Amino acid sequence: MEEGKLDVAMIEANIAKMMAETMKLVDEGAKLRAETAKLQRDARWYPVIWATAFVGAVLGVAELLR
């Protein structure tokens, strides 16, 4: 009977370890989702930056040619 209790305790300990590892993975997933959202927000500005740089370059060349 003592061996059965030991097996149950080992199984419960393994389940607790797995649950802790699962929570770590869930937290890591949340961090990755937050990072992805930030990168996507930042990427929305790239076309504006490129357009502004292009307009600035065109105006600079136009000023030189004037």
Image (spheres, rainbow, N blue to C red):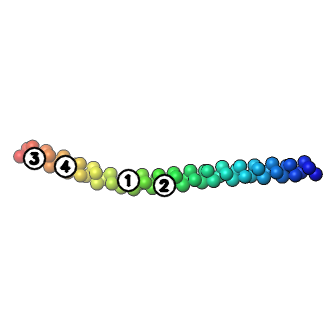
Q: CA distance from mark 2 to mark 4?
A: 34 Å
Residues at marks 3 and 2 touching, judged by CB atoms closer than 8 Å: no
Badge 1: how crowded within 10 Å, few (<14), some, or many (20+)? Answer: few
x then y, percent, for residue 15: 74, 52
| Circle 3: residue type | Glu
Q: Which residue is mark 4?
A: 56
Q: Which residue is mark 3?
A: 63
Residue sitting at x 48%, y 55%: 34
- Numbered label attached to residue 34: 2
Q: Earlier in the sequence, mark 1 or mark 2?
A: 2
| Circle 2: residue type | Ala
| Circle 4: residue type | Gly
Q: Earlier in the sequence, mark 3 or mark 1?
A: 1
Residues at marks 2 and 4 touching, judged by CB atoms closer than 8 Å: no
For the residue pair 65 and 24, the one nearer the viewer reads as 24
x then y, percent, for residue 32: 51, 51
Q: Which secondary structure lies at badge 1?
A: helix
Q: Earlier in the sequence, mark 3 or mark 2?
A: 2
